[in-house]
Amino acid sequence: MENLDLGKVSLIIGFALIIIGFWGLLSQKNIIKIIVSFTILETGVNILIVSLGYLKGRTAPIIDASVEQGADHNVLNSIVDPVPQALVLTAIVIGFGVTALLLAYAMKLFRAKRTLEINQFNDLKW
Amino acid sequence: MNNELIYIILAIAIGVLLIIMAIIAILNEKLSIAVIAAGVVSLFASILFLLMSAPDVAMTEAAIGSGLSTLIFFYVLNKIKKYND
Amino acid sequence: MIKNFLIALVLASFVFMFYNLYITYEPKTELSGIAAHYAENGGKEVGAANLVTAVVVAYRGFDTLGEVTILFLTASIIGFFLKLSKKDEERVIVHHGTSELLVTASQILIPIIFLFGAYVFMNGHLTPGGGFQGGAIIASGVVLMIMANPNHEINHHAILWIESVSGISFIIVGLLGIALAGGFLDMRIFGLGEFGDLFSAGAIPIIYSFIGLKVGAEISNILNKYQKSQKES
């Protein structure tokens, strides 16, 4: 219990969300439910990446009065890692784009066959 | 170190809520409840990002994941409901 | 039956992999490698107070160009997929009438939301925020406008013009970087200025403003297409 810190707790949360997302993706039959599982999976991966950049007891990577440049505090010793945050910023926006695209496909599929069960779309099965 | 302990307890509470909401989102039969549960998952993830000292990421996740994504789901659900009525 | 067993097998293998990753994980205690370089020299080289902005726009500007391209591609594909036929364009969305509360509140809130979105992307290098957040906030304002009056036609040409002009200006600022400074999308084409001012950090406010406008216009376009797709039979 002593070595439990915020990075490890978030790591477990990220892993749990990824597993729940995959379970939903594999076992659900409704197309909208599959897309919801995909967004949960996306959120889990983002939590995982940000938690890898967390350093204990440090603050946000913005240089302001509490993290002076030069002077007393050294910037190098008081901020968390800014690189994973920059990557996750990109990932969230792209995840939204992919979700919007998936929903457009779902609307077209529904228009073609008037059903949302993924078992009914077996035109390409041989 | 009291500050750190409060953060860890808060993170564990949010984590438990997150996992319960994610399971509700997948197992429930009604589609509108599943979509709202996914929006709540995004909202709690935004709070978790704030606890991990990442304000930029928290803002982006709250605006895009919890706001616009849920909105687009409801547009699609409206179209399906209009047909089923 | 066999499907459930296979799903359980896949999930069990994931749990096994994650467990092995977890027990050998040691949290870092120091910034190392490239993050240390960004932390030490970010303030002096880039002049931005927000280090995440410095990484996204200045140090890794090319990845941001890739993301803007992907968003543009997504918006085009959705525009292509959700195209209405001419007969459906003229139909009117039948709705029970929007509540007066929504119409009145939206008249007050929409200018404030646009102003807040513009503030967020213009001050991206000083406070948490930036182009993507500001663009999402502006898109929320546009959605409120659509919801207050579902038959109101957002001026399609205005959104297209804003998006194209912002995209081209972003590329032109990047090419100016080749001509006048270190390389593509280098922000030192303008002076670094005073640390903490609005007009500091070179060309970062300009680049982020163009990105913010472009992302806002694209997401508004996507939402407009979804709204208009309610019209088809």
Image: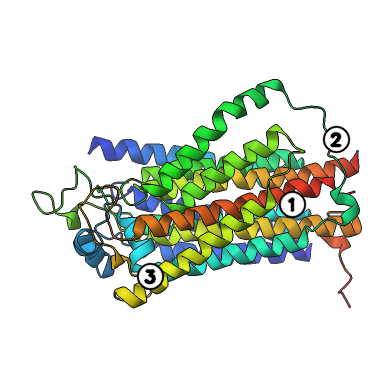
Badge 3 crowding class, 10 Å Cα cut-off, few under 14, some 14 to 19, many 20 or more, is many
Q: Residue at x 54, y 61 (%)?
A: C165
Both labels 2 and 3 in a single chain: yes
- From what the image shows, is residue A79 above or below residue C144? below
* Residue B8 x, y percent position in the rendering: 35, 41
Foreground residue, C90 or A34? C90
Q: CA distance from mark 1 to mark 2?
A: 25 Å
Looking at the image, residue C204 sits to the left or right of residue C136; the answer is left
Number of the label disc, if any, that sits on residue A32: 1
* Residue A120 x, y percent position in the rendering: 88, 61
Q: Is the image coloured rainbow, by chain, by secondary structure, or in one colour?
A: rainbow
Front position among marks 3 and 1: 3
Label 1 secondary element = helix
Label 3 secondary element = loop
* Amino acid found under the numbered disc labelled 3: Leu
Which residue bears the numbered disc 2? Answer: C94
Label 2 secondary element = loop
Which residue bears the numbered disc 3? Answer: C185
